[in-house]
Image (cartoon, rainbow, N blue to C red):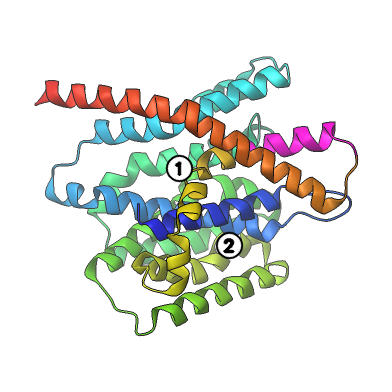
Amino acid sequence: MIETLQSLRFVFVIMIFMSHFAYRGIEPFDAGGDCGVAFFFILSGFVVSLGYGRQVSEGTFRFSRFIMRRMVKLYPLHLLCLVFFLAVNVCAIDYRALLNLFLLQSWVPDADVYFSCNSVSWFLSSLFFCYLVFPWVYKHVSTMLTMGVLLLYVLVAYLTPYDEVNAILYVNPLVRFVDFYIGMVLYRYYERGFGLGSPTAWECLVLVFLLMTLAAYPFVDAKLRNAPLYWLVLVPLVLVFAKGEGAVSSILRAKPMLMLASLSMPVYMIHQMAIGMLLHRLPLLPYHVMLFVCLLAVLVAGWLIDRFFLRQIGRVADNNLRKSAFILI
């Protein structure tokens, strides 16, 4: 992955973290949560196109190998978090747990289902649908298809009742695929090449635009908050930082940022459970002290999971994938 975009993952994970941290009467940062989710769907479409788009175009793409790599990267962490949740909460394995096990929960338009167990895993449920349809859609990306996708989104948003906004516009895989598709279109534009007259100025400009968008969040219609509000800023942000030519990009490429970026997925997957457990078990503390404790605990736990669980699984999986590729050849 492009290093600047990799570091931005951590920035947006922290925004999602803050959207789930409410303490002593201080409300969570809801705007950051919706923005972070939209960013990750768009970034996923961009990055997958960067890694596999040429193979799809040239006819060398192997769907089974692609899906296996996606599964190895995400499913063990999901399974670890699911088992931890069920064990800590002493939950019976009901239909919601089974839907979570097979990453199908986001297809059910019921908050008690799609936000069940480790609630943030709904994102993986919707993301895997995007992976499944990626190779077919990538072949057919065009101006006409893009216009059709956006018009269909407008129609769905218009028809969605306000009490179903979360179930349909925020969680549903078919709707969230629009964000992923935007990422694919962005990669097509990036692939053609473009120049930035003053890279640092552009980077600062999109960051200011991002802050303005976050500030506007409370005043925007609920149907626009989940994604369309942020498309306006995330599209230029991804393109500008994919180029990575400015001073801000130099900061994002620093080793500490890249190290934190490597923890993005475990931090995302465990943060809500960790926040809930710590707020419930720790004594009453000042807001900033509790925030520091929770963030530090999540970072340390994320590092341990990455170092002693994910990396080991990754090594074993890479060896098996190499052997299977050799056998197929």
- Residue shown at 47% from the left, 55% from the top: 7
Residue 175 falls left or right of residue 135: right
Residue receiving disc 2: 158
Q: In x, y percent, where is residue 272?
A: 68, 39
Q: In x, y percent, where is residue 137?
A: 29, 50
Looking at the rendered image, the disc whose residue lies closer to the viewer, 2 or 1, is 1
Q: In x, y percent, where is residue 269?
A: 58, 37
Secondary structure under tag 2 reads helix
Q: In x, y percent, where is residue 291?
A: 76, 49
The amino acid type, in three-letter code, at marker 2 is: Tyr
Q: CA distance from mark 2 to mark 1?
A: 24 Å
Q: Which residues are magenta?
A: 270-283
- Residue shown at 32% from the left, 30% from the top: 68
Residue 272 falls left or right of residue 158: right
> Is residue 20 in view?
yes
> Split into 4 quadrants, where in the image is the C terminus?
top left
The amino acid type, in three-letter code, at marker 1 is: Leu
| Residue 272 within the segment the image draws in magenta | yes
Give the total of numbered labels.
2
- Residue shown at 41% from the left, 74% from the top: 246
The disc at residue 259 is none
Q: Earlier in the sequence, mark 2 or mark 1?
A: 1
| Residue 141 within the segment the image draws in magenta | no
Residue receiving disc 1: 127
